[in-house]
Image (cartoon, rainbow, N blue to C red):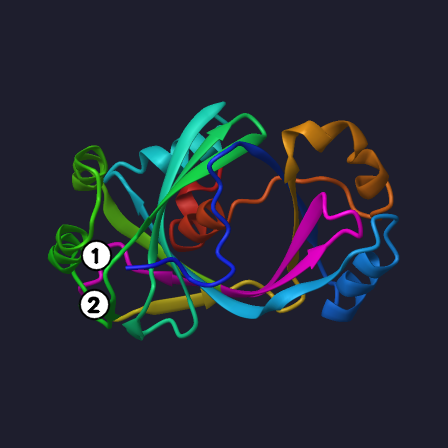
Amino acid sequence: MSTPANYTLLETARFERKFVLENSSLSYAKMLLKINTGIFSPIYHKRKVNNIYFDTPNLTSYYENHFGKSERTKIRVRWYGETLGLIQEPILEIKLKFGAAGKKKSYPLKSFHLKEGFSRQDWNSVFQASELPEMVRSELKRNVPTLLNNYEREYFQSFDKLFRFTLDYNLKFINVKSLTGSFLEKALPENTIILELKYDIADDKSVKKITTALPVRLGKFSKYIRGVEIFNPHLAV
């Protein structure tokens, strides 16, 4: 088992700031980064990101995130490329948030085939076949798959290499709470773009030169919360 190329390990905490562009084009978002005082340029290559989120049956992670609990946890399996079929180099991520800062613990998983009808028992088989700490296995037993999402992602880095933006678009959500029936897919409007600024805590004092040059306010946006509420509109209070 191995981690994918260009995968970012996040063993120390960093800040992640999100900016939501509504009714915007991809070219406009890229232009904002190009003319920013940070002088951002593309790094890596465009990738399709897939995530399956896990939560307790009563959606503990959802509520902790929704109500802004300062210390919270999010569990997901991430992979790149096609959403269905043979999933290679998947990564189990446990994201830990402390206010606006966060880090993640990453564990490579065994490859698996994802298709309709992929059950919790199938997930248990994947986890059992993978090298996971016993404490992580115990945590996974309390959680079930609740949501699958995917989106296109591009990466940009500042000239001084201290700041990085990810640009996410074509966001789609699939209801997989039980994964026993047909996949039900819904998508955000095509002109919804998420810019996320990532940087080390030590560089927080100099981040204003980046953020003040953006004609969009810092906002709150969780792909997990949005996806859960798309399929459960009664939760969106």
Q: Using residue 77 as the reference point, say whether residue 216 is left or right of it.
A: right
Residue of label 2: 181
67, 99: nearer the viewer: 99
Residue 178: mark in rendering: 1
Is residue 156 inside the magenta stretch?
A: yes
Give the x, y percent position of residue 2: 33, 59
Q: Is residue 81 above or below residue 76?
A: below
Q: Is residue 237 above or below residue 229?
A: above
Instruction: Give, as a three-letter code, the residue at label 2.
Output: Gly
Q: Are the residues at dot 1 and dot 2 in contact (C-beta closer than 8 Å)?
A: yes
Residue 172 visible, this orientation: no
Magenta residues span: 151-180
Instruction: Give, as a three-letter code, the residue at label 1.
Output: Ser
Q: Is residue 206 above or below residue 181?
A: above
Q: Using residue 169 as the reference point, say whether residue 80 is left or right of it.
A: left
Is residue 36 inside the magenta stretch?
A: no
Q: Tell me the quarter of the picture where residue 143 sits.
A: top left
159, 152: nearer the viewer: 159
